[in-house]
Amino acid sequence: MPRMLRLILPLLAVVAAATGLSVAASPAYAASLTSVASFGSNPGNLTMYSYRPDGMPSGAPLVVAMHGCTQNATDYFTNAGWRKYADLWRFALVLPEQKSANNSTSCFNWFETGDTARGGGEALSIKQMVDYAVANYGVDASRVYVTGLSAGGAMTAVMLATYPDVFAGGAIMAGIAYRCATSTLNAYSCMNPGVDKTPAAWGDLVRAAYSGYSGARPTVAVWHGTSDTTVAPANATELRDQWTNVLGVSQAPTSTASLPGGTSLSNYGDKVKVYLVSGMTHATPVDPGSATEQCGTAGTYYKDTICSSYYQAKDWGLDNGTASPTASPTASPTASPTPTASPTPTTGPCVRASNYAHVTAGRAHMTGGYVYANGSNQSMGLYNVFTTHGLQQTGANYWVIADSTC
């Protein structure tokens, strides 16, 4: 293991809290997290764990959930909220686990080319876990989803890029765009302050991961805290650029909404969704409590903001259509309720300038050294004169990033 790797991996370290995630007043479940001894050739030398809740029907969905550095499958299973909804809505979980023999800090090797290409390494091992679950658990191969935090989030992007024919959707938590880094040497700059590429350049990296593929591609959700100093919020913007380009939608959102916990949602044609959690550091968003939409226990890497697992499961339809809580209003109550969708982006100018100039002109604001568009709160990267963006005004003091049209 290179010495440089020992330096970078602690920056990715995530999740270290203990919790119990069960539906209030529900009976004890006999089902448990189970190690699978043999699931394929396993070229990445990973360990597979699976969970099938009591009463899971044939044809149920499957969620692949990946832990962060210093953690393991049991930690993520216990703390991330997914067990609660697997029990509640009866879908299966697969939890890949890294081995210390592969990585001294138990990070998935999202920055190693041999582990991030289709047909080999850790990426193929995870795909073989899905194949095993489909063949042995009776899950629906058309309803397989993938998620993960930090290094697991970066590995989620790997799986979406290399196996678009396997996954229906993915949720990247505090992660990094596919092939931002190809070694430990350039992983630093990807994590913080982030690497800026054009949407087309990012998209080309994904398209090259499965050259010639012309089938349907998974939807992508990006979750990120606006005060994350381990994996900078600029990575959420780069992920948005990468996947909107791949999925053929504009970098300007078609609608926006406010969710609990200071969370803003920008929706890009129902193909890419970006959730920014205001003030949250490098963590999984949780919301402790017994209500259906609550999960997790607050801790160093679990911030009491919003139960991301609940909202992501709902978005993927894992709840079989049960009703959702009403989104929080975006401002103080008014006499007449207003929709949360942003105005049609034709009401104001489009201005391209440096982040410094945008803040100075009042189109954006700076928090903790990073710049966010006023209104939409979209992450724009570092507060300096070198990083530039186009901003489109779509309402009173409401600006959205419009790099492709401005």
Image (tube, rainbow, N blue to C red):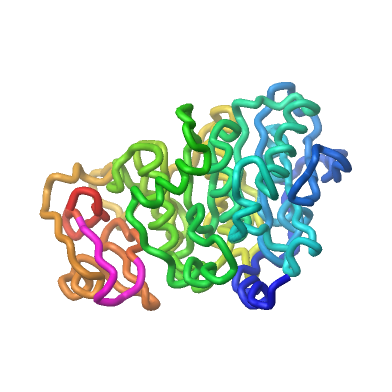
Taking the spot 52% from the left edge, 69% from the top edge, the residue there is: 186
In the picture provided, is 306 more to the left or to the right than 257? right
- Residue interval drawn in magenta: 381-391
**Residue 167, image x and y in percent?**
58, 35
Q: Which residue is painted at 13% across and 45% down in the image?
A: 346
Is 37 on the left-hand or right-hand side of 226? right
Number of marks in the rendered image: 0
Up/down of 71 relative to 338, above or below: below
Whether residue 238 is in magenta: the answer is no
Which is nearer the eye, 222 or 362?
A: 222
Taking the spot 48% from the left edge, 66% from the top edge, the residue there is 190
Residue 231 visible in the displayed image: yes
Outermost residue toward the top in this view: 58
Residue 338 in picture, x, y percent from top left:
26, 44
Residue 337 visible in image:
no
Residue 363 quadrant = bottom left
* Residue 386 drawn at (x, y percent): 27, 73
Q: Residue at (73%, 64%) from the top-left corner?
A: 103
Instruction: Locate residue 56 relative to residue 231 in the image: left or right.
Output: right
Nearer to me, 101 or 370: 101
Residue 49 picture quarter: top right
Asked if 29 appears above or below 178 in the picture, the reply is above
157 horizontally vs 93: left or right:
left
Whether the magenta-drawn stretch holds residue 384 is answered as yes
Residue 38's x, y, as percent? 86, 40
Q: Is residue 79 above or below residue 249?
A: below
Q: Nearer the viewer, residue 129 or 358?
A: 129
In the rendered image, which quarter contains the N terminus? Answer: bottom right
